[in-house]
Amino acid sequence: MPDEFHSIDPQTLSRQEAHRLLLHCVSPRPIAFTSTLSPNGKPNLAPFSYFMAGGANPPSVVISPLTTRTGELKDTLRNIEATGEYVINVVTYAIRERMNLASAEFPYGVDEFVEAGFTSLPSVKVKPARVAESPLHLECHLFQIVHHGSGPLAANYIIGEVVYFHVSDSVWVDGRIDALRVDAIARMGDNWYCRAYAPAMFEMSRPQAVSASPPDAARA
Ligand SMILES: Cc1cc2nc3c(=O)[nH]c(=O)nc-3n(C[C@H](O)[C@H](O)[C@H](O)COP(=O)(O)O)c2cc1C
């Protein structure tokens, strides 16, 4: 017997309830620890799990800093809108607590590198710094910002082009990234996270190309 389903029309939910449901349904999500600079050069660092890669020609990524519950724009969005540059740093299990600390809503202009105890490394093609404690850094140029909705919890999709990659020696084996060494974490619903490490990982290769089935008439 198939399961019974609870069918939910998002129009019957509060924004908070819809947000909570979405976070469970689109899960686990990788975390883009995003470094930016304000127009007057103040560093900012914050995690975003509304994060995906969307293509490789050119390498393309999306994050979405939501409009806040009070209808304001987050510092990361303001900075990227103003400067067009940012760095996405992958979050590992080792830095989970400091990443969480950096997510606190500090006043605009407070440097989360300092507040959460991270070390900045200079970037190559953009001005915002990289996070030394993360093993993978993506330097990005803004391509486009797409606003979907308005007011509290509205989406602000920041589409970016990756213009430079940095891979730490700690995860680089024979000229490629060893997935078993990255130890990334991902965000789930409520306060749940998961960890991409050996006991939770498995490999599965793609199927071979399959030829199309003959039309019904040919089969008969
Ligand atoms: C793991 C994690 C993931 C988060 N993902 C998002 C997200 O995708 N979008 C968002 O608006 N806020 C997200 N937040 C909350 C922001 O990090 C938080 O609002 C932060 O203060 C924003 O900083 P900013 O104003 O300096 O940009 C997340 C927080 C954590 C801990």
Image: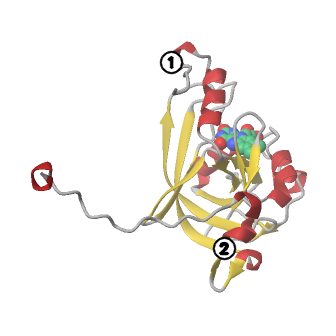
Residue situated furthest top in the rendering: 12
Q: Residue furthest left?
A: 217
x, y (%) of residue 8? 53, 19
Above or below residue 196? Residue 151 is: above
Q: Is residue 111 above or below residue 162?
A: above
Circle 1 packing at 10 Å, graded few (<14), some (14-19), many (20+), is few
**Position in image of residue 25 (x %, y %):** 59, 35
1 with respect to 71 (left or right):
left
Q: Nearer the viewer, residue 206 or 138?
A: 206
Residue at (26, 64) in percent of width and height:
211
Query: Taking the image as drawn, is residue 74 in sight?
Result: no
Check disc 2 and give the amino acid type: His
Give the vertical position of 93 relative to 146 (above or below): below
Q: Quadrant of residue 174?
A: bottom right
Q: Which residue is mark 2?
A: 166
The alpha-carbon separation of the residues under discs 2 and 1 comes to 43 Å
Give 79 or 144, whichever is nearer the viewer. 144
Marks counted in the figure total 2
Q: Give how far across and how far down residue 142 sits, in percent.
A: 53, 56
Q: Are marks 2 and 1 in contact (CB under 8 Å)?
A: no
Secondary structure under the numbered disc 1 in the rendered image: loop
Q: Earlier in the sequence, mark 2 or mark 1?
A: 1
User: Looking at the image, in which quadrant does ligand 1 appear?
Assistant: top right
Disc 1 residue type? Asp
Q: Is residue 34 left or right of residue 116?
A: left
Disc 1 marks which residue? 9
Say which mark, if any, is on residue 112. none
- The image position of residue 68, as x and y in percent, is 68, 30
Residue 78 location, quadrant: top right
The residue drawn where x is 66% and y is 59% is 88
